[in-house]
Amino acid sequence: MAGNLTLAMIKPHVIRDRHCGEIIDRIEKRGFGVLLVKMVHLRKEGAEEFYKEHEGKPFYKNLVNVMCSGPVWVMVLAKANAVEEWRAAMGVTHPAEAAAGTIRRDFGDHNNITNNAVHGSASDHDAQHEIDFFFSREISLAERINTLDSGEEVF
């Protein structure tokens, strides 16, 4: 898995503004494969757990509130050097400071750093953890189906 997969999320305000299709189009045009995708609405406890590493930082409470404010699209993206490639496509964290043509620059709120349009894993280790957080059930089922004997029932 290392190097080839990353987690991406499209944040609630982007969904409300109906820009998901444009972002997914950019993902595909940059050569990523979308392996898994689902829409979820995080509860406060889920957002707190997912962003636990930021607990105590000044932006933490706002980040949790933003991520609970509506549904998010969660995706597993595949490409060589996936983490680095996705981070380059996203741009830096603050949309106002992101380079022209990046997703955060084009779709993020330049006045609110937590409304920066998308999330991406920071490292291969984080990608594994984040993919497991959202997709452990789907991965477990896929692995089980992949290893079944021909006569064994799936469910």
Image (cartoon, helix red, strand yellow):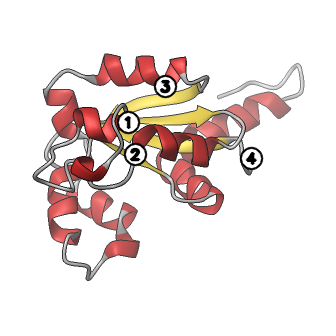
Identify the residue shown where x is 24% and y is 33%: 107
Numbered badge on residue 1: 4
Q: SS class of the residue under badge 1?
A: loop
Q: Distance between the residues labelled 1 and 3?
A: 11 Å
Q: Earlier in the sequence, mark 2 or mark 4?
A: 4
Identify the residue shown where x is 35% and y is 65%: 51
Crowding near the residue tagged with mark 4, few <14, some 14–19, many ≥20 C-alpha atoms within 10 Å: few
Front of the two marks 3 and 4 = 3
Q: Distance between the residues labelled 1 and 4?
A: 26 Å
146 or 39: nearer the eye? 39
Crowding near the residue tagged with mark 3, few <14, some 14–19, many ≥20 C-alpha atoms within 10 Å: some
145 or 130: nearer the eye? 130
Q: In this view, does 127 lie above or below 140?
A: below
Q: Quarter of the image holding residue 17?
A: top left
Q: Is residue 22 above or below residue 6?
A: above
Residue highlighted by disc 3: 27
Q: Is residue 119 above or below residue 47?
A: above
Front of the two marks 2 and 4 = 2
Pinpoint residue 1: horizontal percent, then vertical percent. 74, 46
Pinpoint residue 89: horizontal percent, then vertical percent. 47, 37
Q: Distance between the residues labelled 2 and 4?
A: 23 Å
Residue highlighted by disc 2: 91
Badge 1 amino acid: Thr
